Amino acid sequence: MFKVNKKEIELNGKKISLETGKIARQADGAIIARCGETIVMATVVGAKKVNPEVDYFPLSVNYQEKYYSAGKIPGGYFKREARPTESETLISRLIDRPIRPLFPDEFRNEVQLLPTVISYDKENESDILSIIASSAALAISGMPFMGPVGASRVGFIDGKYVLNPSKKELEKSKLDLVVAGTKEAVLMVESQANGLSEEEMLKAVKFGHENFIPIIKMIEDLAKDCKKPDWIVEKKDLSEVKKRIDKEFSAELKKAFSIKDKQERSNLISDITERAKKLYEEDENISELDVNYELKNLEKKIVRTDILKNKKRIDGRGLADVRPIECEVGILPRTHGSALFTRGETQAIVTTTLGTSDDEQRIETLDGLVRERFMLHYNFPPFSVGETGRIGTGRREIGHGKLAWRAIKSSLPSKESFPYTFRIVSEITESNGSSSMATVCGTSLALMDAGVPIKEPVAGIAMGLIKEGEDFSVLSDILGDEDHLGDMDFKVAGTKDGITSLQMDIKITGITFEIMEQALNQAKDGRIHILGEMNKALDKSRADVGKHTPKMEKITVDKKDIATVIGKGGATIREIVEKSGAKVDVNDEGVVTVAAPDEESRNIALQFIKDLTAKAELNKIYNGKVMKIMEFGAFVNFLGKQDGLVHISELADKRVAKVTDVVKEGDEVKVKVIGFDRGKVKLSIKQAVA
């Protein structure tokens, strides 16, 4: 019934297998990829007709993690997988980025790629396996995919590169790098590092590339056995349109791209575009999309030629020049920390808010519940580019925010030395090139303004590439148009001493390591320059947190007293919070953290906790309250929630007939500790009075 094709290799002591022909046979391509007991099913389907209204390649990649894969039932009310998690969105982008450049420009059929985790062993990661499975599904589909693509993860532990490290190994690693590409070149890099040098990063990329080539060969062998017939892709002859567009608008477009102001330049190009479309209003064979395609090609040619031949950029800068930078801190009086970072026509307002461990983000994953004390949220409103549009958190916002998060993470202080939870929000107020790197710079400044003792200031820069044949130019601090019309988006963030994050996306079929090395070295010079400009505003963290920041104090209680502080169902800790106005957190080691906006609230909470956990001392006198009357004496509450018994004989220095002759419930009294009986405290009112 089934005609199954299977290939298998061993890599770094682990078997990776690819199988097709048994499951999801109606898809254009379907792969079951396995590593250990982690299994990914990747399917791809393409529309057989082109949508004539579309002028781009409509590829959608939706990576999914099924909770049943790890033997779990989802949390929440509906008990089923719902909207994509942040992790799923990031991995979808990770798969998309090396695949998208490998389709020809003329291919505009809608393509849907669905990598799905259907078994997860908590040891072998599903993201790398999903890139491999997706590449294989495309390779056997018959679509015009110029792959296959391979991928690997690289760690750096004890001075050695480690291929596809486990999660435990990554905890000791100075690097978490994902690299993907073809046999000939690297197409995508995503990494988080702990201050690695440019040379170490380049070697890591090379190491990852060399080690995924066997995977590409395995996919090629599988495709030889079972690839479906090649799709026929028709390319429309637009040579006459190209000639006319060149003749009519070359001079005007050259003038437009000599204008430094983005809005003025955009308005002029929009006017040219409208006039170009009118040239073919009466021609049924030439659509607006055809005209727009050739106009964009002309724009690309003009900008790229100026850069390659004349070393002249749109705004007149040299290839390695960074735009003017202005930095301000403390711009928002009520936030815990704030900064305004402006670089040319890119600008970000970044704020820091400090909270307690109660404010940590709780994330449900296939590995279990994870708590995160550092959150970075990036917002890109449409007004930042002078447009109207939808407000919300899309893939762009999540991806850019995570890139900045990776850049900053290694510079944060440990929880033990600085127990706060951090939430950073970056509001992009202007954008013309690399707002994510502006977010990195603004975040570093906002954290220092908040008094967070970061290890080193961090800055970021976006690099670009223009390449024609063997000729190429690497650009520092690229504009939006240089990104759009160029061949590479290469973002590097780090301290003065090393790289903390690297992200690379290539729009052509790959770049050489020579180009990558030049980009890294040029980026270092740019990063050092930006750090110098940032230092003019603030060069180190403030000595203390701001006046509006909740001040924290820690005390340690006996582990036996944790339940006393928390109370039944959390009743006691809620009472402390209500009476003091402070936030109180207790960990499993008995460390109680009290955070309050003022000293009075903090002291009330601390005294409450000290009273709850204090131990009664023999012969010491305490203030108490009569809680219960019995025939043989009265129970008195003292030291917070602690009770002791005053025997009837210890109520007064005379004979007492009835307890109520001396005290009633609710009376405030002084009591002296006169002894202990099997853990119970014996009290005396008469000795306290005497």
Image (spheres, helix red, strand yellow):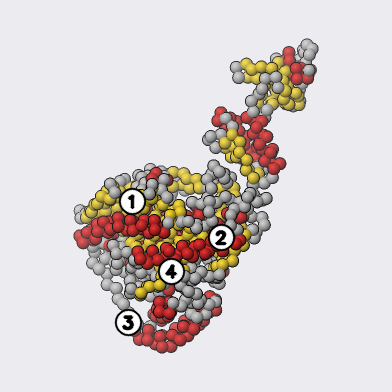
The residue singled out by tag 4 in the image is 464
- Would residue 56 be visible to someone looking at this image? no
Along the horizontal axis of the image, is 618 left or right of 137?
right
Along the horizontal axis of the image, is 637 left or right of 415?
right
Residue at 47%, 64% in the rendered image = 525
Along the horizontal axis of the image, is 449 left or right of 159?
right
Looking at the rendered structure, the kind of residue marked 1 is Leu
Query: Counting residues from the N terminus, which is met first, the one under dot 4 or under dot 3?
Result: 3
Residue at 64%, 55% in the rendered image = 335
Name the element at disc 3.
loop
Looking at the rendered structure, the kind of residue marked 2 is Gly
Decide: is 95 above or below 602.
below
Decide: is 184 above or below 566.
below
Circle number at residue 237: 3
Decide: is 617 above or below 117.
above
Around disc 2, counting alpha carbons within 10 Å, would you say few (fewer than 14), some (14 to 19), or many (20 or more)?
many
Looking at the rendered structure, the kind of residue marked 3 is Asp
Looking at the rendered structure, the kind of residue marked 4 is Gly
Query: Counting residues from the N terminus, which is met first, the one under dot 1 or under dot 2?
Result: 1
Residue at 67%, 34% in the rendered image = 608
Q: Residue 615: x and y, percent?
A: 64, 25
Query: Counting residues from the N terminus, which is met first, the one under dot 1 or under dot 4?
Result: 1
Around disc 4, counting alpha carbons within 10 Å, would you say few (fewer than 14), some (14 to 19), or many (20 or more)?
many
The residue singled out by tag 2 in the image is 442
Name the element at disc 1.
strand
The residue singled out by tag 1 in the image is 163
Q: Residue 219: x and y, percent?
A: 26, 58
Q: CA distance from mark 1 to mark 2?
A: 34 Å
Q: CA distance from mark 2 to mark 4?
A: 22 Å
Query: Counting residues from the N terminus, which is met first, the one under dot 2 or under dot 3?
Result: 3
Around disc 3, counting alpha carbons within 10 Å, would you say few (fewer than 14), some (14 to 19), or many (20 or more)?
few
Q: Which of the pair 49/667 is nearer the observer? A: 667
